[in-house]
């Protein structure tokens, strides 16, 4: 039964993508079929095969070790006494410094040429499998490691000459993925590293899949590589040595951390205000628990059930995903962190995959500002394609969640890797405000179907982790 539900959920997601396709006759089955096979293949490898699980656990251990070095810098700044106190575990002292550290580290890797080699290697593999152009594959590969604000720089000379379909792919993979610096921030707060890493790698083929269905290539230009208009350094100051690279990265990281802190403060407060107002209105009509998340949850409850989330938790899962789209993923992850201990392990996995992406309304403005500044002639097209890119990125995240839910409902949820539990134990921030976590837990009147058979014997999810808000993309 769970297999049929999972397959049905994936079919619905693909049907929505086809429904919004700009030209269904132009959809290339070879490209979309290969992209889906790659996305599903990654899911099977890292969530089902023993060697794939071991590989992702090894990667998780590496990230966890890196987080330890970030904590060493924070401990030096605020002192052992404050770091070990409850105050030292809050978001400002625990997650934001990680962003600064990883931004500096990535800057060093770029200076040494390591990041470029990794991106080119993965981009070449994506091109070989899917058959898209070299520029598109490089843009997709870059989004696995850096966010939608940085990845366009990898293909900057080609941006002005991208076709609408190629530009749409760049926008979609940007919304479907997350930045490596942000991934580290979530890991530092105890979110399962194996899920985050798997979702990050699945975002590239998932974005390609949805982009090439919703905005397929014109057959006349499908295999034509964009022309580079400028191979110069674009006037950007290049670091003279590794120390300058580290310093530039730290400066970028502090700007990012400040933006994250400000955005989290504003949106958490605004959601709390919205929930307070809705609760007051609902109280007059006999619904004292009425909240922003409750409304979104009820609307998206059937969809989440089709992703193998138990029906009695589908409303909560829908509220989290709706919050991600309408507000942003920062607030959604905060809410997830406050509920992980009460949700079914499969639900936690599905929601983690669904939330792991930058697909929200604010990302449209971010892409107009960033990509539009790099290629001003493309700004009108970015504005025109913005809402469709948001839809495509969201569908990509949902497809990753559907694949994860299907595989885990069959095989059972594996125990959290030691690296994940270690990160969870190291980070015990204060719980998010109750107003943010006011997600309706009341099941719908319809009878609740049985929970996933294998999930009942699955190992429990990690202890309730406080999720971390994500940064300005």
Image (cartoon, helix red, strand yellow):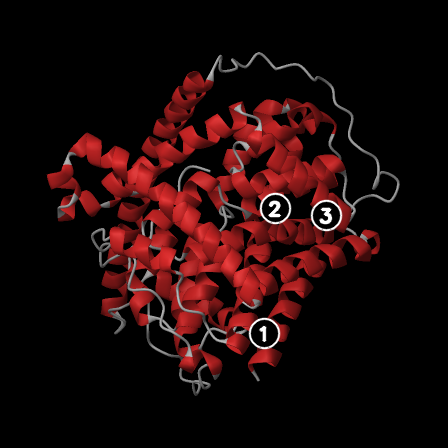
Q: Closer to the N terminus: mark 2 or mark 3?
A: 3
Q: Nearer the viewer, residue 289 or 231?
A: 231
- Is 329 on the left or on the right of 287, as rendered? right
Q: Is residue 270 above or below residue 299?
A: above
Q: CA distance from mark 2 to mark 3?
A: 9 Å
Q: Position of residue 190 (x, y in %)?
A: 33, 54
At a point 35% along the width and 50% down the height, the residue shown is: 331
Between the C-alphas of marks 2 and 1, the distance is 24 Å
In the displayed structure, 255 sits above or below 24; it is above
Circle 1 sits on which residue?
6
Label 3, on which residue? Answer: 215
Q: Specify the farthest residue to the right.
A: 220
Residue 118 in which image quadrant: top right
Q: To which residue does mark 2 refer?
A: 389
Q: Residue at x 52, y 54 (%)?
A: 199
In the rendered image, the quadrant that contains the N terminus is bottom right
In the rendered image, residue 297, in percent from the top left (x then y), is placed at 41, 66
Q: Residue 84: percent from the left, percent from the top?
A: 15, 45
Spot occupied by residue 378 in the image (x, y as percentages of width and height): 66, 29
Can I make out residue 384 in this image?
no
Mark 2 or mark 1: whose residue is earlier in sequence: 1
- Mark 1 residue element: helix
């Amino acid at each position: 039964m769970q297999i049929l539900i999972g397959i049905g959920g994936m079919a619905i997601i693909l049907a929505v993508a086809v429904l919004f396709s700009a030209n269904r006759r132009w959809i290339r089955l070879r490209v979309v079929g290969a992209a889906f096979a790659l996305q599903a293949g990654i899911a099977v490898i890292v969530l089902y095969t023993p060697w794939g699980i071991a590989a992702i656990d090894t990667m998780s251990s590496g990230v966890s070790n890196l987080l330890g070095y970030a904590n060493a810098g924070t401990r030096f700044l605020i002192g052992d006494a404050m770091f070990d106190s409850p105050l030292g575990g809050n978001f400002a002292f625990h997650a934001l410094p990680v962003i600064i550290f990883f931004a500096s580290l990535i800057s060093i890797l770029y200076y040494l040429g390591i990041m470029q080699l990794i991106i080119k290697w993965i981009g070449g593999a994506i091109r070989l499998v899917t058959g898209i152009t070299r520029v598109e594959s490089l843009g997709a590969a870059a989004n696995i490691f850096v966010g939608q604000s940085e990845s366009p720089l990898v293909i900057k000379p080609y941006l002005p000459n991208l076709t609408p379909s190629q530009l749409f792919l760049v926008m979609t993979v940007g919304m479907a993925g997350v930045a490596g610096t942000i991934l580290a921030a979530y890991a530092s707060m105890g979110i399962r590293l194996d899920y985050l890493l798997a979702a990050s790698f699945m975002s590239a083929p998932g974005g390609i899949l949805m982009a090439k269905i919703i905005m397929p290539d014109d057959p006349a230009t499908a295999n034509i590589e964009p022309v580079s208009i400028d191979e110069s350094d674009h006037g950007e100051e290049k670091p003279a040595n590794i120390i300058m690279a580290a310093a530039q990265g730290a400066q970028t990281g502090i700007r990012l951390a400040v933006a994250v802190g400000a955005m989290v403060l504003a949106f958490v407060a605004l959601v709390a205000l919205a929930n307070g107002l809705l609760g007051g209105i609902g109280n007059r009509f006999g619904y004292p628990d009425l909240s922003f998340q409750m409304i979104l949850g009820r609307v998206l409850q059937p969809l989440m059930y089709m992703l193998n989330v138990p029906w009695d938790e589908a409303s909560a899962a829908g509220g989290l995903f709706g919050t991600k789209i309408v507000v942003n993923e920062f607030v959604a992850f905060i809410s997830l962190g406050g509920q992980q201990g009460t949700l079914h392990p499969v639900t936690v996995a599905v929601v983690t995959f669904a939330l792991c992406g930058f697909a929200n309304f604010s990302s449209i403005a971010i892409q107009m500002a960033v990509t539009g500044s790099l290629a001003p002639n493309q700004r009108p097209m970015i504005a025109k394609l913005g809402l469709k890119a948001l839809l495509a990125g969201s569908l990509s995240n949902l497809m990753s969640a559907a694949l994860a839910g299907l595989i885990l409902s069959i095989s059972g949820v594996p125990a959290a890797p030691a690296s994940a539990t270690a990160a969870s134990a190291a980070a015990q921030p204060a719980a998010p405000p109750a107003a943010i976590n006011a997600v309706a837990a009341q099941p719908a009147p319809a009878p609740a179907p049985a929970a996933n058979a294998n999930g009942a014997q699955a190992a429990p999810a990690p202890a309730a982790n406080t999720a971390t808000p994500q940064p300005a993309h």
